[in-house]
Image (tube, rainbow, N blue to C red):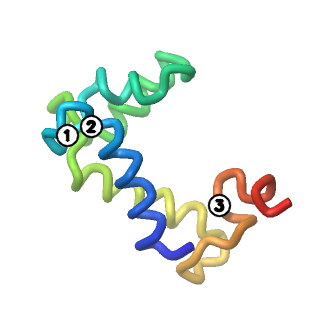
């Protein structure tokens, strides 16, 4: 999976969470998109992504965090994520 493919996948998740269609994900939308997650952990994650602390995640903030995550996952630094490098990849590959 390339960075562009990884970004496209994350953008699709982002836009699905954007229930009011304003191209921003509010804290409430973020939390609602992950109803089974721990509220404290999710709140901290939201605060981390919301770099300007305006109460919503915009496309630039999403891109920044997605790019950082991709870089962290790409252990061999070759610009693509192998099945083993993708989250849950070993499970998917079996």
**Mark 3 residue element:** loop
Q: Gap between marks 2 and 3, in whole Å?
A: 25 Å
Number of numbered callouts drawn: 3
Q: In this view, does 4 lie to the left or right of 36?
A: left
**Mark 2 residue element:** loop
Discs 2/1, front: 2
- Residue 64, numbered circle: none
Q: In percent of the image, x 68 and y 64: which residue is there? A: 85
Residue 38 lies, in percent from the top left, at 54, 18
Residue farthest right in this picture: 94
Residue 36's image quarter?
Answer: top right
Residue 37 lies, in percent from the top left, at 55, 23
Residue 13 lies, in percent from the top left, at 41, 46
- Residue 86, numbered circle: 3
Q: Which one is in front, 34 or 55?
A: 34
Residue 24 lies, in percent from the top left, at 19, 40
Q: Callout 2: 10 Å neighbours few (<14), some, many (20+)? A: some
Discs 2/3, front: 2
Residue farthest bottom in this picture: 78
Q: In percent of the image, x 71 and y 51: which residue is there? A: 88
Q: Which of marks 2 and 3 is nearer the N terminus?
A: 2
Q: Earlier in the sequence, mark 2 or mark 1?
A: 2
From the image, tell me which residue sits under label 1: 24
From the image, tell me which residue sits under label 2: 18
Circle 2/circle 1 CB separation < 8 Å: yes
Q: Gap between marks 2 and 1, in whole Å?
A: 6 Å
Q: Earlier in the sequence, mark 1 or mark 3?
A: 1
Q: In this view, does 41 lie to the left or right of 30?
A: right
Image quarter hosting the N terminus: bottom right
Image quarter hosting the C terminus: bottom right
Q: Which one is in front, 29 or 20?
A: 20
Q: Callout 3: 10 Å neighbours few (<14), some, many (20+)? A: some
């Amino acid at each position: 999976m390339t960075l562009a493919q990884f970004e496209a996948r994350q953008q699709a998740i982002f836009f699905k969470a954007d229930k009011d269609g304003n191209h921003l994900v509010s804290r409430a939308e973020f939390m609602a998109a992950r109803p089974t997650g721990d509220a404290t952990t999710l709140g901290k994650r939201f605060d981390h992504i919301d770099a300007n602390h305006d109460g919503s995640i915009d496309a630039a903030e999403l891109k920044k965090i997605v790019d950082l995550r991709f870089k962290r996952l790409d252990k061999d630094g070759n610009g693509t994520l192998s099945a083993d490098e993708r989250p849950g990849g070993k499970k998917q590959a079996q």
